Image (cartoon, rainbow, N blue to C red):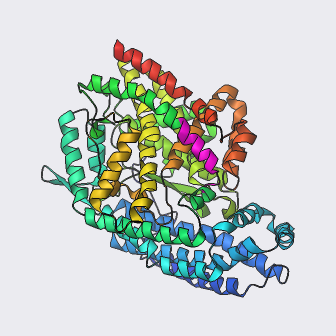
Amino acid sequence: MQASINWTLDTIFKGGVKAPNFTQKTEALRSQVETFVERAEELPSLGEKDDDWVALLLEMDAFQSEITNCWVYAHCLSCANTQDKDASRAEAIVSEIYGRFIRARVPIEDALAFETDASFNAFVNREDLKVLKPGLENIRKLAPLLLPRNEQALMEELSQDGFHAWSQLYDRNAGRLQISIDGENFSSAQVFNRFSGSDDAEERTRCFSAYKSAWANDRDLWASILTHLTGTRIVLNKKRDCGPLDDVLASARMSRKSLDAMHNAIEMFRVELLAYLEGKAQLLGLEQLGWQDLRAPLGSADISHSWDDSVEFVLTHFKSSQEPLFLLAKQAFEESWIEAEDRPNKRAGGWCASVPQNRESRIFMTHGGSFGSTVTLAHELGHAYHNSVLWDQPPSIRRVPMTLAETASVFAENVVRDAALAAAKNNDQRLAMLDARLRSAVSFLMDIPTRFQFEMGLYDLRSKGELDPDELDQLMLDCQKRCFVNALREWNPSFWSSKLHFFMSRRSFYNFPYSFGYLFSSLVYAQAQAIGPGFEARYVRLLKETGWRDAEDIAMDHLGLNLEDPETWLKAMDPIRKDLKEFKALVSN
């Protein structure tokens, strides 16, 4: 089918961020959120005026969908054109309103967390709160991580012009970064696609060098921003008497034991990937791979994919595997939910955002003309399918942690990757497909753990003083060498400066959830293949429960698996072993 490579945003709002329908809506939300702050402060103890509590909670739950629609609209515009200052300002305005919304929740969360069990249970078991009960129970679980009420409120007030402002500073400056190659300016995303997808070693080296140099120009600024973001987290953790991972794991609704089990399994398995890195270097005519070579394509050039190729490939193979996923993807293409054009002034990366009031999603990516872009498209459409499964649930139980948010996206990737491997016409094409699959394994089991180790190390560095770019480079280099088992000839020590995830104020450790999602989805996918069509209903139930249940309970109830056992995670790597075996056989031919 023909599908536009650009999205339409008119179904969300029309006319841009300065049009009356958007500005009037944001002003109304700004006024509404201030009433929430006042009403929340005036709430009595549970058991006194519970009808007031119920009314406020239901209104605030609905508010989340409205503010999400506004933020997604502004975010879409600012990502699609980093030169659009109006969109950036609008995004900041909506973020400020959301910050006030978080502030309004402080007295509510404080009361719910510290009320007696009897009062809390009597309240949450009211019939008119039935839909919100799981979310309210999750708030109570977070009690050990909450500051005293007044301190929590002050922190939220100051964060907008402090903590979050540092993140916005990075986002704006990084988004406007221009990289000059042969006298022509490119965005960071465009140059990344050039050096990661080229089959020309000299081109990869040249573009990678330009990429690193451009990011190094402002390395003192990037280090300063990271200093203040990490420093703020250290202060908060001391006040709460917790470690850097405690709040992250609580938000992820998983145990430290599960995280350690996963990392232990990765550590045990990682050495097996060296055979792939060595074989790839051999096929590329290199003694060892460099960082810029990790994503270099192998095999037949026939697998290059135009945008139309990607659309057709995804639809064809979604339909043969998962009819509901196919229907959702078809709707996304027909209604132009996707922005994928390769052009300057776009932000780097890819994402999918739910537009809950419209029961739609929006996908942002830069299509690079390769099969890798087809995989990215499938990945983001998997997120959109996950969003659609949750639309009928209240916003308070649509809060999917990143660990579980990757379930449907990687599942969709697996559908496309398996189809591509099965459709390969010869060994050259099979080699290309296996390379694409094993590149993902390297990304999730080597690169992502590198980022985790680096972020853990940040706290030690920051506790000694202001972060220095040279020290950050050294930390990143040490982590890369450890997690890649010293297998590369050239590294990327300045990687920390170009990775948005390290600079996000609202989330730390935006890394290990990708490894979790990759492996957990492998376990889900294996059962889907074993059970067949009968698994579909169970899969939907599993996805719905990601909005409020703990990961360990979901895995045990739906898959019969113990996430706190390293053997579970090693089992998730069985498909990689199968790919490695075939890859090695093809290399030796």
Q: Is residue 586 in view?
A: yes
Residue 278: image x %, image y %? 33, 25
Residue 304: image x %, image y %? 34, 32
The picture quadrant where one finds residue 104 is: bottom right
Q: Is residue 367 in view?
A: no
Residue 159: image x %, image y %? 49, 76
Q: Is residue 264 magenta?
A: yes
Q: Residue furthest front?
A: 464
Depth order, front residue of 67/523 = 523
For image coordinates 42% across by 36% down, the residue present is 442
Instruction: Label the magenta part by its dominant secondary structure.
Output: helix
Residue 474: image x %, image y %? 30, 52
In the image, residue 360 above or below residue 481: below
Depth order, front residue of 505/116 = 116
Which image quarter holds the C terminus? top left
The picture quadrant where one finds residue 167 is: bottom left
Q: Residue furthest left?
A: 183
For image coordinates 70% across by 50% down, the residue present is 545
Depth order, front residue of 282/179 = 282
In the image, residue 509 above or below residue 154: above
Q: Is 493 displayed left or right of 312 in the figure?
A: left
Q: Which residues are magenta?
A: 252-265
